[in-house]
């Protein structure tokens, strides 16, 4: 019989050769297949756990409990944190790339290379203004989405009869 150099005793088939031996607490794939997992039970257990965490019944909160929690915790909204525009503008002049350009501007000024210094300054300012306006446009888009989500629209079914 042919023995592969890394085939320990009890492993004779080629598919079992060179596999690390299983530890006592590890199961093989065949063992795992013998234990069917009931997804419905797991889902129900998860829902029950969430209900217990939130202290709700199967029908949800009563009107009184919802009003009490609203008074205690407030509305379920993200706070509207606004950053001042001047801070947004200045944020485009911090970081590695703007810092590198600022250092180059200082070096060009010390060397009295005015054309290079003014080119780098224009590049830095242009980058800052473009970034600022892009951030403002993105902020406006987010604000528009917030307005849409705040609208108290009751879902009304719409039917088109012909």
Image (tube, rainbow, N blue to C red):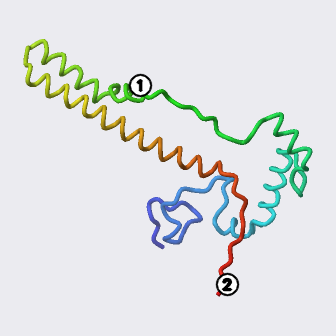
Q: Quadrant of residue 135?
A: top left
Q: Residue furthest toward the bottom?
A: 162
Which residue is more in the foreground, 33 or 69? Answer: 69
Residue depicted at 48% across the width and 47% down the height: 141
Q: Quadrant of residue 32?
A: bottom right
Residue depicted at 44% across the width and 44% down the height: 138
User: Is disc 2 placed on a helix, strand or loop?
Assistant: loop
Q: According to the image, label 1 marks what residue?
A: 86
x, y (%) of residue 128? Answer: 30, 31
x, y (%) of residue 95? Answer: 34, 27
Which residue is more in the foreground, 25 or 157? Answer: 157
48 with respect to 129 (left or right):
right
Residue depicted at 10% across the width and 25% down the height: 116
Q: Earlier in the sequence, mark 1 or mark 2?
A: 1
Decide: is 125 above or below 15: above
Image disc number at residue 158: none
Residue depicted at 59% across the width and 52% down the height: 148
Q: From the viewer's perspective, is the residue at label 1 or at label 2 nearer?
A: 2
Marks 1 and 2, Cα distance to the nearest angstrom? 54 Å
Q: Residues within 10 Å of mark 2 (few under 14, many from 20)?
A: few
x, y (%) of residue 155? Answer: 71, 63
102 with respect to 24 (left or right):
left
x, y (%) of residue 140? Answer: 47, 43
How many callouts does the rendering have? 2
Q: According to the image, label 2 marks what residue?
A: 161
Decide: is 140 above or below 98: below
State the quadrant of the C terminus: bottom right
């Amino acid at each position: 019989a042919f023995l592969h150099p890394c085939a320990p005793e009890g492993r004779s088939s080629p598919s079992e050769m060179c596999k690390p031996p299983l530890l006592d607490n590890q199961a093989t794939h065949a063992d795992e297949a013998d234990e069917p997992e009931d997804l419905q039970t797991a889902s129900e257990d998860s829902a029950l756990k969430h209900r217990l965490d939130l202290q709700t019944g199967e029908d949800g909160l009563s009107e009184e409990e919802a009003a009490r929690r609203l008074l205690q915790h407030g509305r379920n909204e993200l706070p509207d944190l606004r950053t001042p525009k001047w801070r947004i503008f200045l944020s485009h002049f911090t970081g590695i790339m703007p810092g590198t350009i600022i250092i180059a501007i200082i070096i060009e000024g010390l060397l009295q290379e005015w054309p290079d210094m003014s080119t780098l300054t224009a590049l830095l300012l242009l980058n800052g203004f473009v970034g600022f306006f892009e951030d403002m446009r993105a902020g406006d888009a987010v604000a528009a989405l917030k307005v849409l989500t705040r609208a108290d629209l009751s879902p009304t079914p719409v039917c088109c009869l012909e």
